[in-house]
Image (cartoon, rainbow, N blue to C red):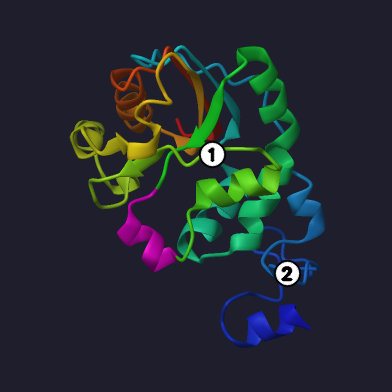
Amino acid sequence: MLGRFLSSSGLAEDRCVICGAYADDPYQGYLCGNCMDGIKRDISIRPDRKLPQVQGFRVFSRYEGVLREIIRLVKFRRVVPLARRIGKAVAEDIGEYAELVSPDIITFVPVHIFRRWGRGFDQNEEILRGAGVEFENVLVRVKYSRPLARLSKSRRTASVRGAFRVRTRWRERIHGKRVLVFDDVITTGSTAVSVAETLTGAGASSVYFYFVAYED
């Protein structure tokens, strides 16, 4: 069984890291089905903030509990199947938001190529694949930095300033387009603002965001 191989190789656990029950999914081995089914949209979230250059945004849930643990496992334990499971959980909500804002293009906030090499994948790209969303690879992260979770708000802002550019083949195609950008977590909003400035600076008519989780 793949699950046993992952467990014996140190890549997974036999027990759910949330409730301790048997991790019954042989493709990831960290969480049980009951905990995975606990990923639900929190409609009470109303972040009291404005993001410059961002026309609007939606958040699926809070960065806590099961969802927080799953995102951490994806990023720091490289559990790609969990990224796909997040995508399945948010698929319907992303679809609803896309219908609401009618984007011409859906894309995502990319990791730097060094982080992608180290991790082996881009978690935002994998989540969108799990959601079955058609998306384009529009942006490049050109500035490498430490994980933003370890930085203060002011240092986060400085870290992501000028961190992105539009890929060459998209520089003409982005003009006048409505763009919906996907990202896993919003904390200060610094990354979203930097991305929005990059896209509007390249000619996008409006930029919207969809986040999986909101960290207070």
In the figure, 189 relative to 185: above or below? above
Membership of 116 in magenta stretch:
yes
- Precedes in sequence: disc 2 or disc 1: 2
In the figure, 36 relative to 117: above or below? above
Q: Quadrant of residue 161?
A: top left
Query: Viewed as shown, does residue 213 lie left or right of 130?
Result: left
Query: Viewed as shown, does residue 17 lie left or right of 165?
Result: right
Q: Position of residue 4 (x, y in %)?
A: 72, 83
Residue type at mark 2? Answer: Tyr
Along the viewing direction, whichever of 75 and 95 lies nearer the viewer: 95
Can residue 167 be seen by looking at this rendering? no
- Residue at screen point 23% across, 46% down: 143
Disc number at residue 186?
A: none
Query: Viewed as shown, does residue 51 lie left or right of 179?
Result: left
Q: If the image is split into quadrants, where does the C terminus sit?
A: top left
User: Regarding mark 1 in the picture, which secondary structure is present there?
Assistant: loop
Query: Which secondary structure is most common in the magenta stretch?
Result: helix
Q: Position of residue 80 (x, y in %)?
A: 59, 61
Q: If the image is split into quadrants, where does the N terminus sit?
A: bottom right
Membership of 14 in magenta stretch:
no
Along the viewing direction, whichever of 177 and 184 lies nearer the viewer: 177
Along the viewing direction, whichever of 57 and 181 lies nearer the viewer: 181
Q: Position of residue 61 (x, y in %)?
A: 61, 32
Along the viewing direction, whichever of 17 and 107 lies nearer the viewer: 107
The residue indicated by pointer 2 is 27
| Magenta stretch in the rendered image | 111-119
In the figure, 126 relative to 23: above or below? above
Q: Residues within 10 Å of mark 1 (few under 14, many from 20)?
A: many
- Residue at screen point 41% across, 45% down: 110
The residue indicated by pointer 1 is 63
